Image (cartoon, coloured by chain):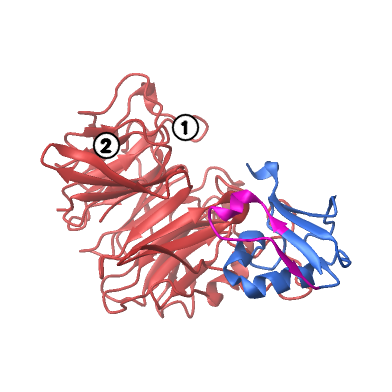
Chain colours: A blue, B red
Amino acid sequence: MAKISFTPNIQRHIACPPSEAPGASLREVLDHVFAGNPAARSYVLDDQGALRKHMIIFIDGRAAADRTRLLDKVTAAISIFVFQALSGG
Amino acid sequence: MSDKLLISTRKGLFHVARRSAGWEIAHADFLGDNVSLTLSDPRDGRLYCALDHGHFGVKMHRSTASGWEETAAPAYPPKPEGLEENDMWGRPLAWSTARIWALEPGGRDEPGTLWCGTQPGGLFRSRDHGASWEIIGALWHHPLRAQWMGGGADLPALHSICVDPRDSKCISVAVSTGGVWFTADGGESWSQRGEGMRAEHVPPDKTHDPLSQDVHCLSQCRSAPERFWVQHHNGIFVSSDGARNFTEITQARPSAFGFPVAVHPRDPETAWFVPEIKDEKRIPAGGALMVTRTRDGGKSFEILTKGLPQTHAYDVVYRHALAIDAEGERLAFGSTTGGLWVSENQGDDWVCVTHTLPPVYAARFG
């Protein structure tokens, strides 16, 4: 199970508590998280399901490389952090 | 006459009310958030508010008996697998709502119907008070849509929506840049309109191409719906045949450049503008803020300055930031430098409500 956390900034708009989710890819983990919190999905992903332009996701300290399909591999016990990038601020 | 104003700004939605002592800010919603546009639906009084949360995307909220609630924002359909479509810069065009640029109620016979224009150019309709949205596919998939270009932004923006008061299925929209488009069947089919406009910023062979026109704002007279006014990137144009053909107005002074136009709801000959020097110098001429008014269909213009700052005023008024009330007596406008002015006599005199608002994107009575 991956551990996933969201930026405090997003909490002002939509509650995104830390959670754990299964999945072999970042896409699968996020799909699982948003299945339980559907309102949060559009805050992180755009209309096509890609990572929003000024969002960034770290997987064990490494920025996710596939921002469109989110196919970065995820292993059990990995930590995922969803942040806003300073580029958009 | 309306005693309420909704002022959408970079840092919140401000409710302005006319009290016995005059106009004042009553309260604010979404303080700190980027409010790009607000609609007060005259059919049921419900408010709709478009927010741009930057990192977190575009959101829509609507009023309820107990306050605001987030509702669906217009979202583009899945981009077909394998479709390669680039923007004018050669970058892949994202089928994703980048900003809400127009928000209008449907006709009186269509309760709950809303229209929404977006960047990168999609037009959406809701039939359920904004609970869900559908893209108008016939316009989005029109073969000429791919030739729309950004105007003041990287991507095209559908910013003006005029629902014909005689027939709710007849809708005219305008795109920056992409000209004027019309449907007579509620969005099932579309045709380009806007012959007669002239674009200075394109090669000579496209100067009079309706598709190349950078319409800044399109406004339809409610009592004479064949009459449309356009504030264009390089001029003012007027149509008397339902936006099929336009005539350039050359009498405007001190300039014909600006963003908004407001037309009197009962007098198609009367319209207001907020001029700036020109495209490459977007400030009021001489640092003197003014509104101009024509009462004769553009043959002559009055310069209205009473109550407006006349020295070192560098206010820019965006396309949705000039409002007129349903009776055509009261006007209001807000500026990029946070000024808000109201007139109760068609612009003859103005009162400054405040000059310390965040940058104003839109003003509306309601």
x, y percent for residue B35: 45, 50
Residue at left 77%, top 69%?
A29
Residue that numbered label 1 is attached to = B282
The amino acid marked with disc number 1 is: Arg
Q: Is B240 left or right of A8, judged from the image as shown?
A: left
Mark in front: 2 vs 1: 2
Verify whether residue B52 appears in magenta.
Answer: no
Q: CB of mark 2 within 8 Å of CB of mark 1?
A: no
Q: Residue furthest top?
A: B311
Name the residue nearer the viewer: A20 or B243. A20
x, y percent for residue B246: 38, 56
Which stretch appears magenta? A5-22
Answer with the quarter of the image where residue B77 lies. Answer: bottom right
Say which label, 2 or 1, has the lower sequence index: 1
Name the residue nearer the viewer: B343 or A62. A62
Q: Is residue B208 above or below residue B142?
A: above
The residue carrying pointer 2 sits among few (fewer than 14), some (14 to 19) or many (20 or more) residues within 10 Å by Cα, namely many
Secondary structure state at the residue bearing disc 2: strand
Residue at left 75%, top 67%?
A20
Residue that numbered label 2 is attached to = B341
